[in-house]
Image: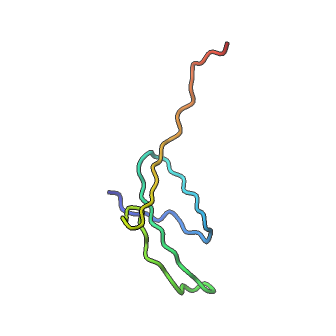
Amino acid sequence: MVPPAELGTTAETQYLITLGTEGKYFFGVKAVRTVEGEIVGESVIVWSSDADYDFGLQYFAAPASPGGLKLP
């Protein structure tokens, strides 16, 4: 198993992750509350592989463009 890697942080409610390799991915999510730049609350990391918090992603690469087609 590949060790976890932090892909980024955001203050937004949505975050786009770009994957380059097909496969099954597990994600961890942690919430941090700050007030005037100081951390005042922090959740545990919830992993997509945790049975109580099941979510995940299966990524498939886009198919290659067809070639050698003849138009009528």
Q: Residue 1 at x, y = what percent?
A: 32, 57
Q: Residue furthest right?
A: 72
- From the viewer's perspective, is 4 left or right of 17? left
Picture quarter containing residue 33?
A: bottom right
Q: Image height check: is 32 above or below 28?
A: below
Q: Residue 7 at x, y = what percent?
A: 50, 62
Q: Residue 21 at x, y = what percent?
A: 45, 46
Picture quarter containing residue 11?
A: bottom right
Coloring basis for residues: rainbow
Q: Residue furthest left?
A: 1
Q: Nearer the viewer, residue 18 or 47?
A: 47
How many dots with numbers?
A: 0
Residue at (55, 69) in percent of width and height = 9
Q: Nearer the viewer, residue 4 or 25?
A: 25
Q: Image height check: is 22 above or below 30?
A: above
Residue at (53, 78) in percent of width and height = 32
- From the viewer's perspective, is 60 left or right of 38? left
Picture quarter containing residue 27?
A: bottom left
Quarter of the image where the C terminus is located: top right
Q: Residue 59 at x, y = what percent?
A: 47, 47
Q: Nearer the viewer, residue 25 or 19?
A: 25
- From the viewer's perspective, is 23 left or right of 71? left
Q: Image height check: is 68 above or below 47?
A: above
Q: Residue furthest front?
A: 52
